[in-house]
Image (spheres, helix red, strand yellow):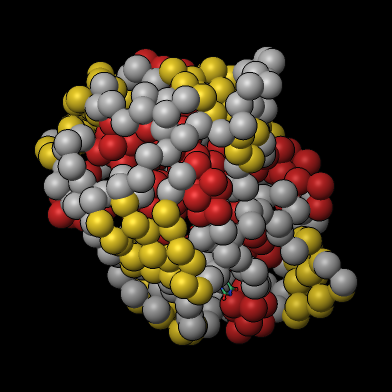
Amino acid sequence: MSNTFVIKGNGGDRNLHGTVRVTGAKNAALKVIAATVLFRDTLNLTNIPEINDTLRMFDLLKDMGADVTNNKRGSYNVFVPNQFATELSPGIAKRMRASIVLTGPVLARYGEVSFPHPGGCVIGARPLDLFVSGFEKMGAKVTIKEDSYIVEAKKGLVGAEFFLKNQSVTVTETFLMAAVLAKGTTVIKNAAMEPEIADLAAFLNKCGAKISGAGTPIITIKGGKLLSGKGHPYKTMPDRIEAGSFLVLGALAARELHITNCNPAHLESPIEILRSAGVFIETKKNEIIVRAPSHLKPVDIKTHEYPGFPTDLQAPMTVLLTQADGESTVFETIFEGRLNYTESLSAMGASITMMDPHRALVRGKTELKGRKLTSPDLRAGLAFVIAAIVAKGESVIHNVDTTIDRGYEDVENRLREIGVNIERAKMVPESVA
Ligand code: EPZ
């Protein structure tokens, strides 16, 4: 599959219309795929997004000895046997930060796990100190060799009390899952509250776990035996970041756009902010309707842990602010390298001043012009697609497969259905600057 998008911009017209359906959430599916290690029998997973990251997570499991069958699009059966390798393949794990969530379940079930420092996108240093201290708190011994971690708890993990210095999503999920098989009770304080965490806990409880408080800052887990998936197929919740990305696109360029199969309750902060920028938004149970206004008002955004404004929507929202009449500030509080992509937006004609690695000042409205771009990471890549759609002229976006394809399923076809002129290019036009 080609690695490049060619997009003909609509030059600021508000002509997109129709319906775009949201797929299953990448950041929910990845964790439930890892949770299959906690089960003594086969688990059926449905509405799994067909994206590079989920396929990679399945490859990791298969490489370690799991039996994974793909029944039909988005539906998988997974069985993890008692005989299972405990090393995460560096070739796969290094390319996907989310592989870290597998370490908790593997360590809890098999008493050891080894893994490389996971790679992932360029958005920040992304240390592992909370994982290391968490493993040690649960009675494990951690050995760090060059770039790999060996964690051992031959007698099994014991319940512990944590206070997380950062409300880390994957730290919360990893120790929530490890605690399901630990001896005794674990309490995670200052836990992350993202909806994917409550979704994971609710599903594991259906299958025999004893987790309370997920979705709040204090989660309590009573350890016990392996879980059973019998009679409990898992259906992946809708992807709120994907829905939010389409919402921003609609706020910029839609005559009227219907975003279906989503949960508006998970998008209260972006909806509130877009409404304050003058965007018409109507919500229904599983649908959001958006119309772009003729003029956008400037707004200040500050990313925050859930239910605050999601850092994963910061880049798409920053594109919108380049088209607002006036000055807006963007304060990225979660990751220290997540504003670097703004240089490319400035090259398209945006007026963005970096005040420090976490803050940028956006002056609008400025006309964006199509150009050649290289997608640096998943969310900035999608922001480049949005910028190219509202720009004048043609854009070429490279590096699609290692970024955008990691998190958005078949995005070019779904965008084309609502009126976007986008191709996954075989040949790259020389004419684009
Ligand atoms: C999850 O990453 C998501 N990834 C990210 O989405 C998302 O941006 C992030 O949460 C925040 O919402 C997945 O769920 C797979 P964190 P995660 O640990 O868990 C610091 C996307 O685009 N920290 O919550 O890795 C860390 O440096 C991705 O889909 C430590 O200091 O993020 C950061 O500043 C990108 N020590 C803060 O916590 C640690 O040991 C929050 O990051 C771990 C994290």
Q: What residue is at 19 percent from the left and 52 percent from the top?
A: 297
Q: What residue is at 54 percent from the left and 17 percent from the top?
A: 423
Quadrant of the rendering where the C terminus is positioned? top right
Specify the quadrant of the image occupied by residue 131. bottom right
- The answer to whether any part of residue 191 appears in the image is yes
Q: Position of residue 190 (x, y in %)?
A: 39, 79
Front residue of this view, candidates 144 and 384: 384
Specify the quadrant of the image occupied by residue 120. bottom right
In the displayed structure, would residue 317 be above or below residue 238?
below
Q: What residue is at 35 percent from the left and 49 percent from the top?
A: 322
Q: How many discs appear?
A: 0
Specify the quadrant of the image occupied by residue 106. bottom right
Q: Position of residue 161 (x, y in %)?
A: 48, 84
Say whether residue 6 is left or right of residue 256. Answer: right
In the displayed structure, would residue 248 be above or below residue 433?
below
Say whether residue 214 is left or right of residue 377. Answer: left
Say whether residue 21 is left or right of residue 96. Answer: left
Say whether residue 430 is left or right of residue 388. Answer: right
Q: Position of residue 88 (x, y in %)?
A: 76, 53
